Amino acid sequence: MPDREKVIKEFELFIKEFHPACTSEGVELDMLREVLSLLKEQEAVEPNVSDINDHDAHGSWWYQCGKCKMPIDYGDRFCRRCGRAVKWT
């Protein structure tokens, strides 16, 4: 499986260095930027920890998706709501 970060960096370099050739061959630069944006949207996010502290010292905590903030379970590979990959450190 390709390394997403490596693909993104290479794609950014391609756009930066070769975009005049691309536009002259009919490949739209805006389309290339949209593809890059889609790749970046698929990057895994780190989960957040959220908590509620009651006044009687009983508290609760859970994990949230780093993108949409919906609750996720420890070890989930993807958020059930937005589908973003979860990167556990």
Image (tube, grey):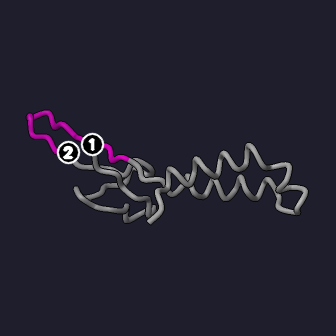
Residue in the foreground of this view, choosing between 68 and 57: 68
- Return the disc, 1 or 2, that comes first in the chain's sequence: 1
Amino acid type, label 2: Trp
Q: Which mark is residue 61?
A: 2
Q: Cα distance, mark 1 to mark 2? A: 7 Å
Residue position marked by numbered label 1 in the rendering: 49
Secondary structure under tag 1 reads strand
In this rendering, is residue 57 above or below 10?
Answer: above
Residue at the image position 80 percent from the left and 49 percent from the top: 19
Reply yes or no: does residue 54 show up in magenta: yes
**Quadrant holding the C terminus:** top left
Secondary structure under tag 2 reads strand
The x and y percentages for residue 34 are 70, 56
Relative to 27, 45 lies left or right: left
Q: Which residues are magenta?
A: 46-60
What is the residue that sits farthest to the right in this orientation?
24
Q: Are marks 1 and 2 in contact (CB under 8 Å)?
A: yes
The x and y percentages for residue 5 are 50, 50
